[in-house]
Structures are given as C-alpha cells and as structure tokens.
Amino acid sequence: MSAQSFGNYQLIKKLATGGMAEVWLAKQTGIEGFNRHVVIKRILPHLAEDPEFVQMFLNEARIASRFNHPNIGQIYDLGEKDGQYYIAMEFIHGEDLGRVMRRAWSTGQWVARHIALRIVADACGGLYYAHTRNDDQGRPLKVVHRDISPQNILISFDGAVKVLDFGIAKASDQVSSTKSGAIKGKFAYMAPEQAAGKVLDARSDIFALGLVLYELVTVYGRSSVTVSSRRCRPRSNVRSTRLRRSRRSLPSSTAW
C-alpha cells in the first residue's frame, strides 16, 4: 500500500479505528532529509461536525501538549486538514498492556511480578507528573485522566512505559465540561465516585491503576473487558480475593 499525503505527513499504515478517531502510522518529513515516524490521530469524518466530539479531541491535545515526561506519550502537533482535525504524537514501537496480559494468559503464564510492579511504578510516575502540573500562571491544572486501563498503558519493545490517551481527561482550565450525568471511561476500572458521576480528583486515577496492578498479579478481572453500568456499582463494597490466595508465589508483604 502506497503512502497517502496528509499535510506535512505521509500516512503509511492504519493502526486502529475507534469510536472517535482513526490512528495511522505516518512519516513526518522536512528539509535536508529530515524525517521521523509519528502517529497521526484524526477525527472520523462523520464526527467532524459534532461540537462535543471535536471539543473532546482538541482537549486531548491541549492537555497532553503541556506534558514532557518519559512515561507519557508526547504530543507534537495539532492541526486541521481538509476539515479533519488531527493530532501528531510520538510513535512508540510496542504493545498496549492489555495485549501483553492477554498474550501471557493465553500461554498459561503470568506477567512476571517484578515486571508488573515496574510497569505500574512507571505509570505512577507519569500520572504523578500529570496530576501535579500547573498552568502558565502557576495555578494547579488538577488534571484527571479518567480512563486509566491496560489499553491506555503502552509498553515499548525496549521497555519504556507510556501513559496514553488523555482524550477524556479533565483539567481545571478546560474549555468544555462533561454533560451532567454523563459517565466517561471504562467501567471495569472506575472508582466508585466516577461510576456515580461525582466530582473527581487524582485519587480516581490511582484507584484505576490499583485495579490494573491487581489484575496484573492475580489475573482476576481479565474476563470483564466490557462491563455494563449495572456491574460497576458494587466496586465500592466488593470483598476482594486476597492476593496470595490467587497467586501463591507472591511474598507475604503483598498480601493486602
């Protein structure tokens, strides 16, 4: 398949299509032979006229463009071409954590404990950076990702861990606001207050990342990729299986 020209980029291969946008592997070119691989995320044509979707898309670029951290996917550019808004972002050669987990489970294996802890620790580093950012006037941005899940944590083939997709993140200076009663994110990883549509802060992201860690080291939750709103409510009072009961090799210090 030949590359398609799209502004200053050459679209090489479509990587994915979601409900809001399509994602392409692309090459950015410049003078004197300059070129690099990037990822282009562009809003789907039928949503380009929907103000809410456009605002959500632009919001991702506004928030993530402020970040410069080794554990957060970098945003390089925001633009519009032929009526389609797009974001150019860092190309990370790897797989999302959800796929890594499924691959391990499909072969009857676990993600090694020290690797699981390293992945989550690095994701914590990226989230802490995002949670503690200030605006240009020094005021806290109070960013909340709101969609932490294995699908939004990417592992590069050289071992880097990146938190991705701030598309539904909230910040204190955000132009748009979520409609009253609207719940955004993945129910399987939501904190009780998020599932209830309440005001959120950084603790909601920490809760979600804790669920990712629990799933990594126990395999529990792997069947709940799609969870209905009816099943999200018991999170606030569920009695979890103790870790060592599900994975005997864990040391006693992790028997939460």
Image (cartoon, rainbow, N blue to C red):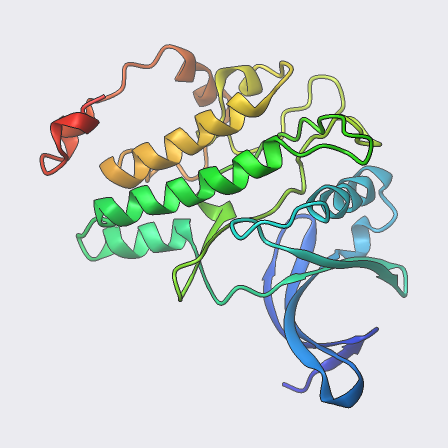
- Relative vertical location of residue 226 with respect to residue 158 in this rendering, above or below: above
Instruction: Name the side, left or right, on which 179 lies relative to 69.
Output: right
Instruction: Name the side, left or right, on which 67 lies relative to 121.
Output: right
- Relative vertical location of residue 250 with respect to residue 196 in this rendering, above or below: below
User: 207 or 133, which is in the foreground?
Assistant: 133
Instruction: Name the side, left or right, on which 204 lies relative to 100.
Output: right
Q: Position of residue 179 (x, y in %)?
A: 76, 23
Residue 153 seen anywhere in this rendered image of the structure: yes
- Relative vertical location of residue 2 with respect to residue 238 in this rendering, above or below: below
Q: Quadrant of the N terminus?
A: bottom right
Q: Position of residue 114 (x, y in %)?
A: 24, 46
Residue 25 seen anywhere in this rendered image of the structure: no
Residue at point 56% right, 25% down? 202
Q: How many marks?
A: 0
Residue at point 58% right, 49% down? 69
Q: Based on the displayed image, in which of its 4 quarters is residue 185 positioned?
A: top right
Residue that extends furthest to the bottom in the rendered view of this protein: 32
Residue that extends furthest to the left in the rendered view of this protein: 248
Residue at point 60% right, 31% down? 131
User: 221 or 27, which is in the foreground?
Assistant: 27
Instruction: Name the side, left or right, on which 235 lies relative to 61.
Output: left
Q: Quadrant of the C terminus?
A: top left
Q: Based on the displayed image, in which of its 4 quarters is residue 157 positioned?
A: bottom left
User: 138 or 61, which is in the foreground?
Assistant: 138
Residue that extends furthest to the top in the rendered view of this protein: 237
Q: Position of residue 115 (x, y in %)?
A: 28, 49
Q: Position of residue 93 (x, y in %)?
A: 49, 67
Residue at point 47% right, 28% down? 206
